[in-house]
Each structure stands twice: as C-alpha cells, then as structure tokens.
Image: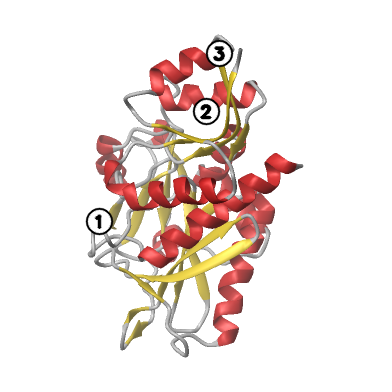
Amino acid sequence: MVRTYDVVMTHKLDADDFFIHRVQQHCAEFGLNFFLIEPTWVQQFYEALAKGQIWARVLLNLHSEHHQPEDIYHRLVRLAAERNVDVIDPPDRARAAFNKAAVHPRLLAAGIHVPYTLIVPSTASGTFQLTEVQREALGSPFVIKPSMGYGKRGLVLDATTEKHIERSMATWPDDNYLFQRKIIPRNLETGPAYFRVYYIFGTVFKSWWNCFNDHYRLIQPGEVSESALAELESVSRRIATLTEMNFFSSEIAQIDSGEFVVIDYVNDQCHMLSQAANPQIGVPNDLVAAIARRLVEAASQRIKK
C-alpha cells in the first residue's frame, strides 16, 4: 500500500518553527495530513518516493539548492515533479525565475523598472573591460551579484572596477554575474523606502524591509499612499505573470523621483524566519502566519480540483 500525504514540505531551518507550526495548524484546519521533510528524514523520504512506497499530492518547497544538482533536496523536488506531485513551484519554472541573468532582460522588455545592468559570464572574468559609457551608466561604487546567488553570498556592494568580480566569484562560483547600478532608496522619517513584497497564489502581501539592517516592519495605515501600494502590487503581479511563479518575494525600492525599482527579482523558497524567533531580522509574526495560511489554502484548493 502506498502511503499518501496531502501536503509535504521541504524545510531545513529549526529557527522557522513558527512558520512550520502555522502550516501544520492550517493543514489540520483544512483536514489535510502533513509531513515535514526535514534533514533527518529527507534521504529516507527520497528513497521511499523513488520506490513508490509514498506519494504526496502537494509539495511546498521551502528548501532546495537550485545551483547544486547533487543536493538531496534538489533531487527530491525534481523526483517529486517527475512523479506527478504538485510542486510549489515546479523546479524548472522556479530555477528559471530565480536565474537573475535570464530574468533581467525579460523584466526590462516588459517595462518593469530594474537597475542598469550588465551581465558578465564568469569565463570573461580575466578579460572583460567596462567601456567609458558603461562605467558612467553603472556609477561608482556599483553592485556585483551572482546570477543564482541568495542570502547576500557573493554580493559585492562597493565594486569600483570590473576586477572586483573576483570577490564575488570567490564566495559564490556561478556561470554569470550581474554588474548593477547601485540604487539608493528614498530616505523617510521611518527609514529607507524599501519594501519586501510577497506573491502567494494571487494574493499580495507588502512590508517594509530595511536594506541596511535587514529589519522588517508591517506597513501601518497612512504610511504609504494608496497609489504607491497599488504600484507595488501591480509590479508583483506583473512579475508573477511573466515568470508563472505562484510563491515568491521581491525587493522593491522607491527612489527620490518616486519611481519604484525592482532590486531583487524573484526569491522563491522565501525566508520565513519569524520575529518571534529573531526580532532583528525576522518577518513579522502576523505576516508569517498569513503567508502560511494562504499557502495551505491554495494547496487545499489544488487538491480538490
């Protein structure tokens, strides 16, 4: 007999217990059985799935390494997709959306405001030279980031020469690197005009995120104009339409001109550390709980189809 789970979730961080517990709670409320594929069980789960001993209707992927095909979670998510598990989000789609070098020109073509960017392959690291026009467009200092990087690893915020690509390569080997103009958000009384916007199956959640100290804060009534909130939501929906992603976050800055610029395009496997666990860099508890509920609600709707 095949053991079937309604919802399974890949996850690696014990510090995200608040989010995990909310997912478990909402699964129970929707009458769904649930299994957490944490590091202790991932190898056994993979082997049982490969043998046809277990199956899942929906897999919420909160951990797999897109840039490491040998990673057990990466292999598990791919196997699940091959076995017709409804993976949120499907691995090929998520990897394509996460690839900044591939997504950047698509966003640009769609009219979404992004920083001036040059895409430099790693193979050109020893020979690539900026033209004077490119130097002027990039400004100084400028930003270098790996195409498949996350968590600030490989991120260089004070680059002044093309040779600084080596600093990024040393900490995050990748095929391509983005040279980007450094975007400075408007300075408000409450902090920088910098937002983290979450898209979950058509629902958009918005929060402040201080890019200088990683602190999240819920947007209070009257702090942001209705037109600005509508623009943040519109940008998130346009990215979702372009990438076909169902669950991701984006970092969006508002500059002095009032224009919104998308800094980090598509973060899937969103950081769900709660402020209950870490008040300094955690996501507000109410927002974490709302995201968990929307994910389980969407999973339930997909299972019933």
Label of residue 258 in the image: none
Determine whether, in the image, residue 193 is placed left or right of residue 200. left
| Residue 229 position (above or below residue 189) | above
Quadrant of the image for the N terminus? top right
What residue is disc 1 on?
A: 277
| Residue 287 position (above or below residue 218) | above
Amino acid at circle 2: Val
Query: Could you tell me residue 286's position as x and y percent?
Result: 41, 67
Query: Residue 215's image quarter?
Result: bottom left
- Observer-nearest residue: 231 or 171? 231
Around disc 3, counting alpha carbons within 10 Å, would you say few (fewer than 14), some (14 to 19), or many (20 or more)?
few
Query: Could you tell me residue 41's position as x and y percent?
Result: 37, 23
Quadrant of the image for the C terminus? top right
Amino acid at circle 3: Gln
Look at the image and tell me whether residue 265 can be seen: no
Around disc 1, counting alpha carbons within 10 Å, would you say few (fewer than 14), some (14 to 19), or many (20 or more)?
some
Determine whether, in the image, residue 58 is placed left or right of residue 261. right
What residue is disc 3 on?
A: 53
* Residue at the image position 49 percent from the left and 70 percent from the top: 206
Mark nearest the camera among 3 and 1 is: 3
| Residue 41 position (above or below residue 65) | above
Report helix, strand or loop for mark 1.
loop
Query: Residue 229's image quarter?
Result: bottom right
